[in-house]
């Protein structure tokens, strides 16, 4: 009798565990975020945890890249295009129970645009001259000039709404308005979030979600196979994806991203301040060899900093086509033969593997490289902030971000007054045809200036348990939005 009771109890316990697992999920990520405040850090991994899960903005990106209402249910634009009036949703609370209202929007936008702001995308807020709380549920934003892209700007993770009372703790214990609340962060291992039972919108199906950080591709494969990870939205070992395709327990999700992967060059330091040297480096690069060798065929070659799926994209790959003899001639013409350059590589697979391939390609034209592998925090400090590098490889996953080339203080330090004026004109232009022409001119300008060596558009290749639905196929922004994710059985 005791044995029968024990067996029955075990079955019941197993059944209960199986049911419980249907509202929990473990999400694999290659990189751990340096902090959890999307308004105070540049790392994509921050948004991959908190965007649309913990924090929300006035608007948001949908899975198809569309701009959708979020904390603002609607907005109106003045006839001259300089005043946006946002109507906020009623009954929205932060996770600590305090109300979210117009004053929080005023604080968030003023903080982001302040002179001492540490926001990584401060340019999104540069045109704001005034933010007013008309009443608790109405915010008026006045711009210095028309900006048809303003709702798009407000959808970025850098523009989420935060509370003045809790912003100081956002880096480690974030408090937002989203469908999930922060539970814990075990640094070096995982972040766990839990369903917000007081969420203003439709409650998510998931009760808890854990973001598990696994940098090594083989470890990620083992964790998926063992069921320790339920989904890896961007699987770090593309060479192993075919094994998941052959296994009915898994679904392979292949889509596109906004990630322009580039060999960035420090335009402000010699000899890279010479366009002939930058052109030589660009012609030394065999893109397809990098895509095949580092990404196992996943990726689309690009010749400028623009996503190929964008209707305004111009294929400029021939401008910097693979031509090692031309590269050698340009180096000789520039008097820059026998170069040795520092190549700083962050952790992602595309950078580490791609860096080895690029080093070999540069060696063929007479350029030696000193490779230094950096952890993500080191890369952010030394390369992105400190600008202490010659070459680096990174994927820029922010949407429609060619405007970074209009920021001479940005890490690759490209300073072109005509380009800056073009981007300024683009920011205020609302006519679609005129905007398309400006986007094309911008792409051609940076391609012809060989600002960076443009490699490939990062593919989004994910692996998931076959019983999970609601995951994003594409990545219009850097996010693992779990709002609509659920188990089918």
Image (cartoon, helix red, strand yellow):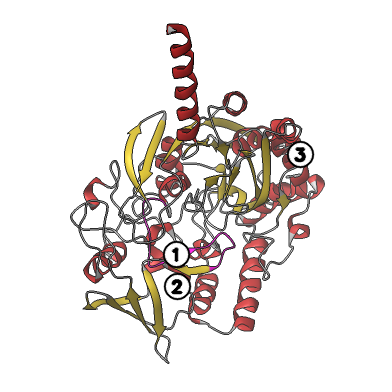
Q: Is residue 60 magenta?
A: yes
Residue 239, quarter of picture: top right
Q: Which residue is labeled 2 in the image?
A: 151
View extreme (top): residue? 2
Circles 2 and 1 in contact, beta carbons < 8 Å: yes
User: What segment is highlighted magenta in the picture?
Assistant: 53-66
Mark 2 residue crowding within 10 angstroms, few (<14) / some (14–19) / many (20+) = some
- Marks 2 and 1, Cα distance to the nearest angstrom? 7 Å
Quadrant, the N terminus: top left
Q: Is residue 225 above or below residue 361?
A: above
Residue 159 image position (x, y, % from top left): 37, 62
Q: Which residue is labeled 1 in the image?
A: 155
Q: Which residue is labeled 3 in the image?
A: 292
Residue 10 seen by the camera: yes
Q: Nearer the viewer, residue 338 or 219?
A: 219
- Residue sitting at 62 percent across and 52 percent down? 473
Query: Mark 2 or mark 3, which is nearer to you?
Result: 2
- Marks 1 and 3, Cα distance to the nearest angstrom? 34 Å
Mark 3 residue crowding within 10 angstroms, few (<14) / some (14–19) / many (20+) = some
Q: Name the main secondary structure of what is drawn in magenta.
A: loop
Residue 363 seen by the camera: no
Q: Is residue 143 above or below residue 485?
A: below
| SS for callout 2 | helix
Earlier sequence position, callout 2 versus callout 3 = 2
Circles 2 and 3 in contact, beta carbons < 8 Å: no
Q: Is residue 143 above or below residue 340?
A: below
| SS for callout 1 | loop
Residue 479 image position (x, y, % from top left): 50, 51
Residue 294, quarter of picture: top right
Q: Nearer the viewer, residue 213 or 472?
A: 472
């Amino acid at each position: 009798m005791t044995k029968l009771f024990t067996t029955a109890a075990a079955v019941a316990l197993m059944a209960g565990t199986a049911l419980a697992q249907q509202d929990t999920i473990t999400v694999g990520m290659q990189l751990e975020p340096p902090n959890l405040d999307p308004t105070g850090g540049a790392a994509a991994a921050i948004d991959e945890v908190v965007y649309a899960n913990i924090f929300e903005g006035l608007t948001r990106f949908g899975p198809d890249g569309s701009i959708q209402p979020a904390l603002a249910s609607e907005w109106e634009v003045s006839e001259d295009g300089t005043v946006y009036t946002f109507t906020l949703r009623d009954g929205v609370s932060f996770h600590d129970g305090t109300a979210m209202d117009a004053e929080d929007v005023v604080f968030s936008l003023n903080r982001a645009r302040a002179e001492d702001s540490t926001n990584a995308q401060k340019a999104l807020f540069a045109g704001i001259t005034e933010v007013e709380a008309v009443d608790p549920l109405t915010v008026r934003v006045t711009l210095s000039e028309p900006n048809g892209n303003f709702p798009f700007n407000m959808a970025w993770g850098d523009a989420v709404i935060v509370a003045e009372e809790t912003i100081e703790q956002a880096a480690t214990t974030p408090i937002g308005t989203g469908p999930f609340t922060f539970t814990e962060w075990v640094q070096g291992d995982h972040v766990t979030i839990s369903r917000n039972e007081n969420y203003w919108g439709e409650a998510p199906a998931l009760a808890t979600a854990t973001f598990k950080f696994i940098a090594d591709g083989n470890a990620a494969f083992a964790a998926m196979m063992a069921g320790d990870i339920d989904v890896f939205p961007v699987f770090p070992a593309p060479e192993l994806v075919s094994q998941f395709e052959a296994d009915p327990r898994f679904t392979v999700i292949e889509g596109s991203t906004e990630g322009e992967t580039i060999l960035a060059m420090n335009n402000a330091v010699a000899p890279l301040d010479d366009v002939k040297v930058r052109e030589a480096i660009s012609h030394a690069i065999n893109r397809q060899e990098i895509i095949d060798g580092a990404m196992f065929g996943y990726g689309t070659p690009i010749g400028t900093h623009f996503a190929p799926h964008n209707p305004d994209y111009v294929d400029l790959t021939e401008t910097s086509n693979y031509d090692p003899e031309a590269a050698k001639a340009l180096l000789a013409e520039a008097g820059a033969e026998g170069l040795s350059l520092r190549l700083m590589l962050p952790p992602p697979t595309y950078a580490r593997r791609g860096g080895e391939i690029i080093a070999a390609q540069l060696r063929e034209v007479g350029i030696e490289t000193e490779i230094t592998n950096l952890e993500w925090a080191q890369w952010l400090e030394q390369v992105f902030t400190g600008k202490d590098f010659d070459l680096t490889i990174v994927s820029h996953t922010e949407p429609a971000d060619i405007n970074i080339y209009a920021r001479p203080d940005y890490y690759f330090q490209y300073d072109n007054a005509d380009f800056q004026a073009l981007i300024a004109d683009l920011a205020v232009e609302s006519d679609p045809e005129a905007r398309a022409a400006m986007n094309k001119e911008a792409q051609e300008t940076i391609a012809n200036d060989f600002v960076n060596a443009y490699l490939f558009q990062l593919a989004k290749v994910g692996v998931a348990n076959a019983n999970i639905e609601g995951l994003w196929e594409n990545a219009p922004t850097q996010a693992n939005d779990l709002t609509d994710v659920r188990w089918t059985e």
